[in-house]
Amino acid sequence: MKLKMFSLVVSCLVLMMITGCASYYKITDPTSRIVYYTKSYDTKGGSIAFKDARTGAMVTIQNSEIKEISRQTFDEEVKK
């Protein structure tokens, strides 16, 4: 009984950690004003590279405005 309760608590904590660690970003190219959405990005010598959530394309841009957004906002914008 105690082992089952312990396993349940550990499973819930792991699930909360996994879902709570996700980050979502809105990336805007200030030159073209194109907006992208992604879950992660890498910096490469003054530019950033990421996978666009809408198209699945790999994108690299020189200048960018990066804003962390909520999962709800991310999901709504990607569906458009």
Image (tube, grey):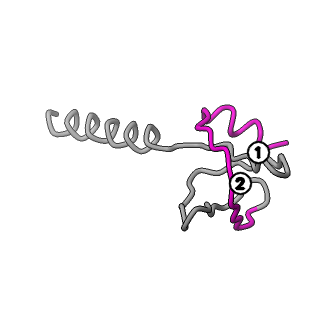
* Front residue of this view, candidates 62 and 58: 62
Does residue 40 sit above or below 25 in this rendering? below
| Highlighted magenta segment, given as a residue range | 56-80
Q: Residue shown at 77%/53% (left/top)?
A: 54
Q: Is residue 62 magenta?
A: yes
Residue bearing mark 2: 53
Inter-mark Cα distance, 2 to 1: 6 Å
**Quarter of the rendering occupied by the C terminus:** top right
Image location of residue 7, percent across then percent down: 24, 41
Residue bearing mark 1: 78
User: Tag 1's secondary structure?
Assistant: helix
The amino acid type of the residue labelled 2 equals Ala
Q: Is residue 59 magenta?
A: yes
Q: Residue shown at 71%/54% (left/top)?
A: 53
Does residue 49 sit above or below 10 in this rendering? below
Image location of residue 19, percent across then percent down: 46, 41
Q: Viewed as shown, does residue 36 lie left or right of 11?
A: right
Residue found at the very far left of the displayed protein? 2
Q: Viewed as shown, does residue 32 lie left or right of 59?
A: right
